[in-house]
Image (spheres, grey):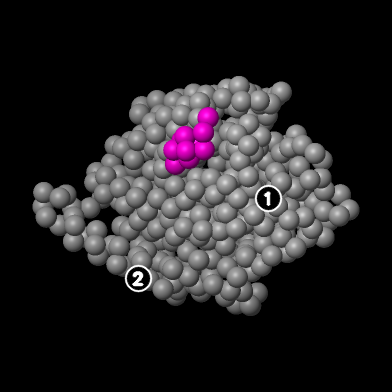
């Protein structure tokens, strides 16, 4: 990888260590220490996703205008403040305020880093290097390596349970983000503004045109809806999976290890899965294959939970992770084809924002649905990624700047 790509992968790695030391245990803290009901827990988790994914468009637009450095630094500072607040939040409204702060911090940090790594992947591909999906798969693997260590750190800090242990975990996460802030302030390069300055009078017109171009593209909107089905399904790692472990084992002791399993699979498998899939399938076909695996994850859980709840949870985690390994790099690689490089930050943010709205709207109903026992909730959730599968847009004809490899008969089947 290029030096910039290595820096972005490392930043994603560190950011996820602090994030996943806390988030997998938030639902248990809300239901246990604070005594919130299932619908309220679902709403809070959905609100966290919305304040993050739903506001990505803000971070993306700011990144296009100012470059990634100031947006990344602001996101790190807000994440430190949000986790300190969450550590001491004792009422539902205080928790909501802390969760929104934590989510908005990621809404600044993540689109800045994701759009920049996509630009770098495109530059490498156009210079005759490897496929853009390979750089993006390595970016995902770096993030998941952090997600591998984060839940283990959280399990150690939360050993014994209680509000004090959750507070310790939040403060440890804030410490990690403080280190990330310091590292980026020193290492992240300065870049020029990406649009005309407001003093030249062209910024507002350019930004209005960018919004109309991105949000008026039917294929982009279809991709956003398909990605929404993935994000809603993936969010069940934090809602449905803890509930299933409680039902099956009476505790969430295995939750950290299941998250570690998910992250380890991504770290070890991202490169070979990308080589296998990208060499045979187009980018839209990779997304469809991933959504199909995610649907199978819910269906397998519905079938296995009556036999062994722990194995059902493990199969759910594994299949969902395999689907994620196909959906994420392929979606990020498809965005430059739809939006172009100049609007990549806005497109990255808008994709996550539209998806975040869907997750927020579905959070409380899904939380209430999971309070019902039996396979029906899992079978209903299996339908969600299937709906997304049929919405994935076909790939456009390649441009001369970015030649498309010859299609095989097998790839045409998945177009």
* Secondary structure under the numbered disc 2 in the rendered image: loop
Q: Which residue is mark 2?
A: 216
Q: Residue at x 50, y 72 (%)?
A: 393
Judged left or right of residue 84, residue 304 is right
* x and y percentages locating residue 269 in the rendered image: 67, 48
Q: Which residue is mark 1?
A: 240
Judged left or right of residue 235, residue 75 is left
* x and y percentages locating residue 198 in the rendered image: 15, 50
Report the quarter where the C terminus lies.
bottom right
Rendered position, 36 above or below 375: above
The image quadrant of residue 178 is top left
User: What's the distance in space between the residues labelled 1 and 2, CA to CA?
Assistant: 35 Å
Using the image as rendered, state which of residue 206 and residue 94 is in the foreground. Answer: 94
Visible residue check, residue 108: yes
Mark 1, other Cα within 10 Å: few <14 / some 14–19 / many ≥20: many
Residue 77 covered by magenta stretch: no
Q: Residue at x 31, y 57 (%)?
A: 342
Residue 95 covered by magenta stretch: yes
Q: Residue furthest right?
A: 307
* x and y percentages locating residue 120 in the rendered image: 41, 49
Using the image as rendered, state which of residue 38 and residue 73 is in the foreground. Answer: 38
Judged left or right of residue 342, residue 177 is right
Q: Where are the magenta residues, as a range?
A: 90-100
The image quadrant of residue 3 is top left
């Amino acid at each position: 990888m290029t030096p910039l790509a290595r820096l972005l992968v490392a930043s994603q790695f560190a950011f996820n260590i602090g994030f996943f030391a806390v988030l997998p245990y938030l639902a248990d803290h809300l239901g246990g220490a604070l005594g919130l009901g299932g619908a309220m827990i679902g709403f809070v988790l959905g609100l966290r996703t919305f304040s993050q994914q739903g506001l990505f468009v803000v971070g993306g637009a700011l990144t296009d205008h100012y470059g990634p450095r100031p947006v990344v630094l602001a996101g790190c500072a807000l994440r430190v403040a949000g986790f300190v607040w969450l550590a001491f939040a004792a009422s539902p409204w205080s928790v909501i305020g802390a969760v929104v702060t934590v989510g908005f911090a990621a809404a600044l940090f993540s689109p800045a880093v994701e759009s920049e790594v996509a630009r770098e992947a495109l530059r490498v591909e156009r210079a005759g290097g490897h496929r853009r999906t390979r750089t993006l798969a390595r970016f995902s693997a770096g993030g998941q390596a952090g997600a591998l260590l984060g839940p283990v750190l959280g399990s150690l800090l939360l050993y014994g349970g209680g509000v004090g242990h959750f507070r310790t975990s939040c403060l440890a996460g804030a410490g990690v983000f403080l280190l990330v802030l310091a590292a980026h302030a020193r290492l992240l390069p300065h870049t020029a503004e990406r649009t005309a300055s407001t003093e030249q009078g062209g910024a507002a017109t350019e930004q209005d045109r960018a919004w109309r171009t991105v949000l008026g593209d039917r294929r982009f909107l279809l991709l956003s809806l398909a990605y929404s089905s993935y994000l809603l399904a993936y969010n069940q790692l934090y809602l449905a999976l803890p509930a299933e472990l409680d039902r099956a084992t009476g505790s969430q002791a295995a939750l950290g290890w299941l998250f570690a399993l998910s992250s380890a699979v991504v770290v070890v498998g991202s490169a070979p899965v990308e080589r296998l899939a990208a060499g045979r399938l187009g980018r839209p076909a990779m997304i469809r294959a991933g959504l199909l695996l995610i649907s199978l994850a819910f269906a397998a859980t519905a079938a296995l939970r009556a036999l062994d709840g722990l194995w059902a949870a493990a199969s759910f985690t594994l299949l969902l992770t395999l689907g994620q390994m196909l959906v994420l790099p392929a979606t990020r690689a498809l965005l430059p084809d739809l939006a172009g490089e100049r609007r990549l930050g806005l497109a990255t943010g808008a994709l996550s924002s539209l998806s975040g709205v869907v997750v927020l709207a579905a959070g409380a109903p899904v939380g209430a649905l999971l309070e019902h026992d039996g396979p029906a909730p899992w079978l209903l959730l299996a339908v969600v990624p299937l709906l997304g599968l049929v919405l994935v847009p076909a790939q456009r004809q390649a441009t001369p700047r970015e030649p498309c490899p010859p299609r095989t008969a097998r790839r045409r089947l998945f177009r």
